[in-house]
Amino acid sequence: MKRRAIAIAVLVVAVLLALAARRLAAGWLASDGVSAAQRPLRAGPRVPTPPRAPLRVVVLDGLSTADATDAAMPALAALCDRGVELAVDVGFPTKSLPVQAVLWTGLTAQQLGLGPTNAARDLPPGALPTRVPGARAVVEAWTVVARSVGFARLEPGPEADAARDDATPAAVAAWATRFPDAARAAVASSSPLVLVHVLAIDEAGHAGGRGAPAYRRAITDADALLARLVAAAPTATWVVTSDHGHRARGGHGDVERELRVVRACVAPRPPNAPAQGAVHLVDLARHLHDVAGVAPRTGAVGRPLASAMRAPDVDATVPRASRFALALAALVLVAGVGFAAWWARPRWLAAWLPLALALYLLWRGVPSLSSRDARGAILCALVAAAPALVLARRSRRTLAVIALEAGAALVAAAIAAEVPRALFGGRPPARPYTTAAFELVAGGAVAVALAALAVALLSAAPDSPPGRRRGAPSGLRTRRRAVRPAASAIRTPRRGVRVRKPDRAVRRSGSC
């Protein structure tokens, strides 16, 4: 009983340590880091600076480009008709706070060192709302976003913010009714800069995906609100955009094009600007600074809007994975699987890792920060490794094969996600696709390794029944097996073994 109890205790400790490590790793992967450089964008023609005017910015949180059609949003279409229609690349990550940080500072999320979360943090000084006296924001919820990007005058109060733990239900319900009127009053005020953040579309997208009726209703309601807002300040400069889109089933965070490229409208049309064009979010930020009469921050690469529309620079603000890291990761993975296949007996035992990867891709698709299923990855890994784990009870080599492949997958995923570089270079660890892949591979590899450890501990030394010496034969069948080899040795001695016969021994002793 002692051996089995010790084995179970070791397993429990290993599982608890693995869970704690996973929680720490997940937090680290989403954390902020040191800023990274951004190359200059392609230069366009010189254009006049747009005239200064009151700024009204509406962020339709979670509105996908595919759903922002003229038929669904007539007010947005009318605004585009008297201005310009834009396809805006918001960069990486596609999370609300990092995206709005780019919009209001003119620096990319990598320059700001922002991770893929909406957690409250202090941005570097110099965001546009802090440089425009009287700037104000009206949001449905998540006041942390507007406060983090520099809006000091902000509605609602903490008690009415549904995203806060200390909010009161009565105040939240009252604000939901009062939000459209409060937004219209702010837009009609004399404030030189007003942000209206509409959240209902994003909440509906998370709840049921883009095809849900609630998502469509939220779009219709947002367009009706936009019509009221524009009517309240028709001579202001309007910028209506989204911070990110949604996958078909809901979710966002990575660089999928359906999430990263959003529809925006700017009115009136800037001087020398075409009616349509593709720009980056830092270009839209530059336009806000130009209209507000505020100089761009040092390091900002945004171009005047009319110039940027005539000089597309596709994917310029998206961080790219290191080709060396990807090649080295592929080499480690192939080497690990190849050596395991050469060593395994039978060889098909080494197929569990490729099978686990294939199962996850078929079931959940390509892993990304927009859509990742940690439990699904663990389940796929355990199902694929089950035959090898069953045979591992009788073969230490099989255990070694499992551990070798799990370790190779973990190391390869870490290299691809540039985790070593982040550890030693202080760079933000989050990367498109590879960060999510590392998180899932780590979970699956650790789960399989724990299962192999369980097999090794529970099958290595089973407990002996009380009252019997360890290793002593028990039962009639065991005693017969113990006797037969001795008798066989007497009858048929092996080569090189001299057996003393009884009659020869008697003659040598002198007995008669």
Image: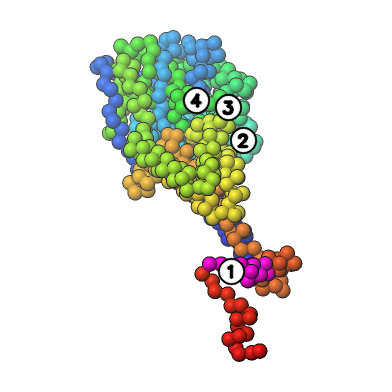
Which residue is farthest right? 476
- Residue 494 falls within the magenta-colored stretch: yes
Q: Which span is picked out in magenta?
A: 482-495
Among numbered discs 2 and 3, the one appearing first in the sequence = 2
Whole-angstrom CA distance, mark 2 to mark 1, is 96 Å
- Which residue is at a point 31% across and 33% down the rendered structure image? 38
Whole-angstrom CA distance, mark 3 to mark 4, is 11 Å
Whole-angstrom CA distance, mark 1 to mark 3, is 76 Å
Location of mark 4 (residue)? 245
Q: Split into 4 quadrants, where in the image is the N terminus?
A: bottom right
In the rendered image, residue 264, in percent from the top left (x then y), is placed at 44, 19
Q: Which of the two discs, 3 and 4, sits closer to the camera?
A: 3
Location of mark 1 (residue)? 493
Q: Amino acid at mark 4?
A: Gly
Is the Cβ of the residue at disc 2 closer than 8 Å to that at disc 3?
A: no
Q: Which of the two discs, 2 and 3, sits closer to the camera?
A: 3
Whole-angstrom CA distance, mark 2 to mark 4, is 29 Å
Is the Cβ of the residue at disc 1 closer than 8 Å to that at disc 4?
A: no
Q: Amino acid at mark 2?
A: Ala
Q: Which of the two discs, 2 and 4, sits closer to the camera?
A: 4
Q: Split into 4 quadrants, where in the image is the C terminus?
A: bottom right
Q: Amino acid at mark 3?
A: Arg
Q: What label does residue 249 carry, if any? A: 3
Location of mark 2 (residue)? 171
